[in-house]
Amino acid sequence: MSQYKIEAGTGQHLGDRTEQQDRTALFAAPRAPGYIMAVVADGMGGMSGGALAAEQVIRTAKQAFDLFSPQTDDVGKLIETIAHDAHTIIKLTAFSSEKQPHSTLVILVITPDKCAFWAHVGDSRLYRFDGPNCAERTIDHSYVEMLVKKGKLSREEARDHRLSNVLVNALGSHDQELTVTLRRHDGLKAGDAFLLCTDGLWHYFSDAELGAALAMNSPRQASEMLINKARERTTNNSGDNCTLAIVKLVEPPSEAKGYTVGKMKRAV
């Protein structure tokens, strides 16, 4: 059986904003040894509404993962339920808080049988890397991505389009039914890595740059490097909140080859 250990870390920067409205977290499952979860949420809504929405995403994810059992629960359904429950609570919060809270969501679950499940809502992204190579990434639920799909805009034009931050799908929205895009990858191995991040990070990097940073560094080192580089590339004091979570699968030490798949080392 292919073996690996898990190294994970998170990072955040306020950017040039007055409030940190992003949230990120890493969780282990008390009832499911060997399962881990990473979550990133980018809150929107002005004042404290965005922070409130993103915090609700993290709270909902933790509560659901605390109760998760692989004997009775399905990972894909768990992730979809988290998204829909957070969506409902955020909408209800809007009535009581007199704000318009919204949030993106990207969530990853790694299982001890070498499977990865992930889902996203909005334009926070997940990248899956095979070594330094980007094997796949999520497609944003954004207006410009719709134009790209219809052939009305190139991906290069979409990158810096004036409407690039307009979303067509977000948690807490009252305007349309929520869409949760769910994916699965089997056969995880040492050398694989995942990056979850908000647009305050991915906007400044190519896929190749992100892959190289993760492949050549520990999660903590990669987080620091990417955030520092994103800040360097920001112009006119316009940097957004910048948030990421990294999960890497690495070869265990030679003397530990018999250890269980899925042991997590965390660096924040």
Image (cartoon, rainbow, N blue to C red):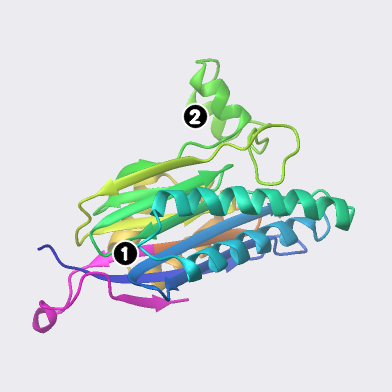
Instruction: Work out which residue is located at the far right of the displayed protein and give it.
Output: 98
Does residue 241 appear left or right of residue 265 in this picture? Answer: right
Magenta segment includes 265: yes
The answer to whether residue 223 is visible is yes
Indicate which disc, 1 or 2, sits on the residue closer to the N terminus. Answer: 2
The quadrant of the picture occupied by the N terminus is bottom left
Task: Give how far across and how far down residue 164 sits, in percent.
Answer: 63, 35
Residue at position x 34%, y 41% in the image: 136
Residue sitting nearer the eye, 199 or 247: 247
Residue 16, located in which quarter of the rendered image?
bottom right
Instruction: Work out which residue is located at the far bottom of the displayed protein and give it.
Output: 255
Q: Which residues are magenta?
A: 247-268
At label 2, the amino acid type is: Glu
- From the image, tell me which residue sits under label 2: 156
Residue at position x 54%, y 56% in the image: 230
Query: How far apart are labels 1 and 2 at the CA level?
Result: 29 Å
Q: Nearer the observer, disc 1 or disc 2?
A: 1
Residue 248: mark in rendering: 1
Q: For mark 2, give the secondary structure.
A: helix
Residue at position x 64%, y 54% in the image: 86
Task: Give how far across and how far down residue 245 sits, in percent.
Answer: 47, 63
Task: Give how far across and how far down residue 19 sits, in percent.
Answer: 75, 64
